[in-house]
Amino acid sequence: MDEKYNFESEKKVFDTFAEWQEFAYKNSLTDGAIVAPPEKQKVVEILDYLGRNPGESIGKFPPLNGNVTIEQIAIISVMCGCLPEYVPVVIAAVEALLAPEFNMAGVQGTTNPVTPLILINGPIVKEIGINSKDGVFGSGFRSNTSIGRTVRLIIWILGGAKPGEHDKSTLAHPAKYCFCIGENEDESKWEPFHVTRGFAAKDNTVTVFGCHGPFHILLKGSSNRIINMITNSIPIYGVNMWTIAGQYMVVMSPSIVKELHDSKISKEKFISELYSKARFNAGNMKHANINEEGAGSMSYWGMVENPPDLNSFKDDELLPMVENKDDIHVVCAGGMSMRWSGFLPGWGVAGAYAVTKTITK
């Protein structure tokens, strides 16, 4: 065995897989599902591939502030079935999660079900077999699953995001196991998400965005009907954009994007349509008695600095879901078979904003 690495982790030997698994359960090294034992040879393979110091720290992961080292990432990657070439994606995702605008400490402790979505762009999507097409939010792909679960286990083990303890999410949702997709750049008629955010098409990037699981909306018909349907479907009073604005994402199947593109509607134009038309109706809010004076977060944008007074608006006025167009993220993913879209509400102005990082070794 190659001894060039000075491992900080304590070495343990297990006679059987079952013995290892029970150890993992008792020591909170698993989210409840089976994890592989982090065999030294597999960890070394990842470290050799990365060519980085095992003790190098990426940062402290809140709220427990566990030190996220290259060695720790390699170990957890092995536990979740990552191949060495997947691990740079994990590292970039962790770096993005630790960015101040994401506010990982807040995401960990909120009662909201928000959890980080990992979105991968660039040639690496094909190179490592990231699913970006049919069933993109589902199961069946090693790269999506192992990358997504590795990031979640880093959040779990080093950050301490355990339900009822530091993770205060009231209901949560299944994406707290795995939430990793690629953009379907091959079949999209629009520029890729990372290009919209200022990167080159040839760049490999990972974006993290704290959100709910997708609310699916079927968008058949003409481009006009598509826009009318989605803009009337996503203004939901119960999401955090009603109380504290923030950001949201819309994931569109490539067949929807094709219809819009063929109708001369660009991504920029579509985002403008979302911003101007996907809004809350002031009169509906008044007459539904859901905007209680002095109720703080129970009011429209009640937790935003200098919140607007709903009574100052006319009944036919439409009020924005987010503060500006840059708070709306549009991604093309999924298969061509049917025109399904997904609405993923964000957390709000408190954080979980989209952060994009370049993937490097």
Image (tube, rainbow, N blue to C red):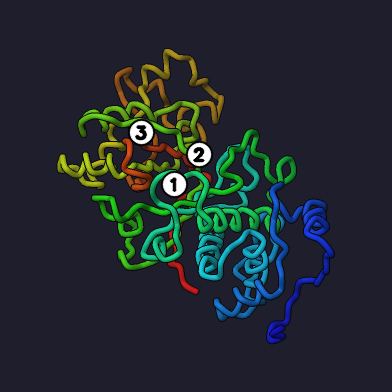
- Mark sitting earlier along the chain (1/2): 1
Numbered disc 1: secondary structure = loop
Q: CA distance from mark 3 to mark 2?
A: 22 Å
Q: CA distance from mark 1 to mark 2?
A: 12 Å
Neighbour tally class for label 2: few under 14, some 14-19, many 20 plus, Cα within 10 Å? many
Q: Quadrant of residue 174?
A: top right
Q: Residue at x 41, y 61 (%)?
A: 125
Numbered disc 3: secondary structure = strand
Which residue is more in the foreground, 224 or 164?
Answer: 224
Residues tagged 1 and 2 counted as in contact (Cβ below 8 A)? no
Q: What count of labels does the image hold?
A: 3
Which residue is more in the foreground, 92 or 339?
Answer: 339
Determine whether, in the image, residue 98 is placed left or right of residue 251. right
Q: Position of residue 150 (x, y in %)?
A: 60, 58
Residue type at numbered disc 1: Val
Taking the image as drawn, is residue 351 in sight?
no
Of circles 3 and 2, the one toward us is 2
Q: Position of residue 331 (x, y in %)?
A: 36, 48
Determine whether, in the image, residue 224 is placed left or right of residue 145. left
Res. 136 mark: 1
The residue labelled by disc 2 is: 213
Residues tagged 3 and 2 counted as in contact (Cβ below 8 A)? no
In the rendered view, tell whether residue 216 sits above or below residue 72.
above
Of circles 1 and 3, the one toward us is 1
The residue labelled by disc 3 is: 320
Neighbour tally class for label 1: few under 14, some 14-19, many 20 plus, Cα within 10 Å? many
